[in-house]
Image (spheres, helix red, strand yellow):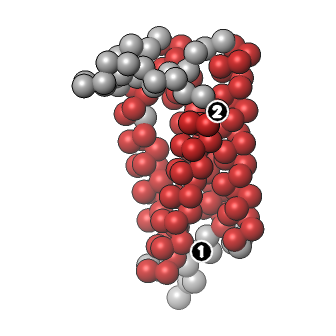
Amino acid sequence: MAGGRGTRVATVAATVLAAEVLWVLLDVIVGIDLRSPAFEGVGRTPDIGPLEVALASGAASLAAWGLLAALERMVRRARTFWSAAAVLAFVGSLGGPLSGTGITAANRTGLVLLHLAVAALLIPALYRTSPAPASH
């Protein structure tokens, strides 16, 4: 099912909203103080609040949409190439929460869940908005 710009805007909004709801569940209700891991050269673990969640999920969503739109203009099998790139980007994004130091296992799990929630919603939803290549 191909969709227009409105469907993609709704997908971005839903992705950000889902990430925010999960942040509330993890941070406010469960009580996990979500923080980014510390990395070499940065000795602190920055707080991850609702603004950071909105910015990260929104940026990821808009970047995914932008790449899909660009591929649709350049290649015949855009959604196939985009799907592979989206899955690789998701797997690569896990490097942040799975590495670094200074955070608890619960915190690390919460960060992975946030990444997973964004990918699980964003990838199939944007995929469905892209037309399948015409058969010859």
Give whichever of 73, 133 is nearer the camera: 73
- Circle 2 Cα neighbour tier, 10 Å, few/some/many (<14 / 14–19 / ≥20): some
Q: Amino acid at mark 1?
A: Ala
**In what element is the residue under mark 2?**
helix
The Cα atoms of the two marked residues, 2 and 1, are separated by: 36 Å
Q: Quadrant of residue 22?
A: top right
Mark 1 secondary-structure assignment: loop
Residue lying at the far bottom of the rendered structure = 136
Residue 58: image location, x then y, percent: 59, 49
Residue 16, quarter of picture: top right
Q: Nearer the viewer, residue 102 or 111?
A: 102
Residue 34 sits above or below residue 69 on the image:
above
Q: Position of residue 125 (x, y in %)?
A: 66, 56
Give the mark count: 2
Q: Is residue 92 left or right of residue 59?
A: left
Q: Residue at horizontal 52%, vertical 50%?
A: 60
For the N terminus, the quadrant is bottom right
Name the residue carrying label 1.
Answer: 132
Q: Which residue is mark 2?
A: 50
106 to the left or right of 29: left
